[in-house]
Amino acid sequence: MAIFNIKLCFMVFTERAYPIFEQVIKDYHVHDNIDQPMVNPYKEGTIEYDLYTKNWIDTVQWHFEDIIRDPQIDPVEALVLKRRIDKSNQDRTDLVERIDSWFWTKYKDTPVRSDATINTESPAWAVDRLSILALKIYHMKEQVEREDATAEHKATCQKKLDVLLEQRKDLSTAIDQLLEDIENGKKYMKVYKQMKMYNDPSTNPVLYGK
């Protein structure tokens, strides 16, 4: 953790986070198997570890979503996969909240200006978007480089890739500006739990009604 904090003095957050996302996607595609175990190279308890885990969840779920859209999928297998997607979504939410807690701890003693405002989106949920954007860029680039695709398909995907790359730049800038504003007391943050009711047997009427 201390090493990461030192790096943050010289490097904005997204310049450290995004390469971790790229590393995850590369690591996953060595075997490209939704059942392969995650081998996180970072020390547990560090923000790097959580960022790696976050993108691993996103990457596996990306491929869950591909598989479940197969029109020939067996209905029983589809139901099993839907349950895995539900769990993955909950794991993703839990990780985002943990990353937000890391941000909150980092900035909790920062003096807040009297005119400070709250952002519509917490830092970690913005980082969540950046994680998924890394996956979009990787897979769109795959389409651009497909040997069996038509020139028209590649050209269309290249235009989309160009937009995604511009979006990465804009989103990274926005995240780093938000963190800078929080650090300078211009913005303040709160950590809200998602409180997903359908996963809770005490609040989902289908579950508590049984």
Image (cartoon, helix red, strand yellow):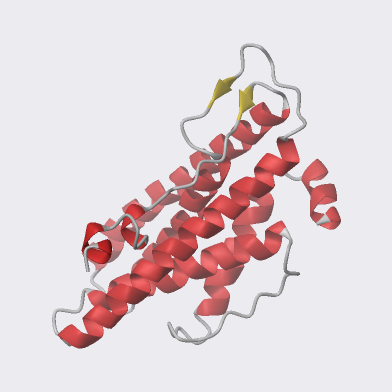
In the displayed structure, does residue 38 sit left or right of residue 70?
right
x, y (%) of residue 165? 46, 50
In the displayed structure, does residue 27 sit left or right of residue 140?
right
Compared with residue 157, is residue 120 higher up or lower down, i.e. above or below?
Answer: above
Query: Which residue is more in the foreground, 109 or 140?
Result: 109
In the displayed structure, does residue 3 sit left or right of residue 185?
right
Can the viewer see residue 83?
Answer: yes
Task: Write down the quadrant of residue 191 in the picture.
Answer: top right
x, y (%) of residue 185? 69, 23
Compared with residue 34, is residue 20 higher up or lower down, i.e. above or below?
Answer: above
Compared with residue 170, is residue 148 higher up or lower down, i.e. above or below?
Answer: below
Can the viewer see residue 20?
Answer: no
Residue at x-position 69% and y-position 53%: 16
Give the residue at the far top of this rendering. 114
Quadrant the N terminus occupies: bottom right
Quadrant the C terminus occupies: bottom left
In the displayed structure, does residue 82 sit left or right of residue 41?
left
Compared with residue 103, is residue 144 higher up or lower down, i.e. above or below?
Answer: below
x, y (%) of residue 6? 85, 49
Count the marks.
0
x, y (%) of residue 18? 60, 56
Residue at x-position 45% and y-position 83%: 32
Residue at x-position 35% and y-position 70%: 85
Residue at x-position 23% and y-position 79%: 79
Query: Which residue is more in the foreground, 78 or 42?
Result: 78
Task: Write down the quadrant of residue 115 in the picture.
Answer: top right
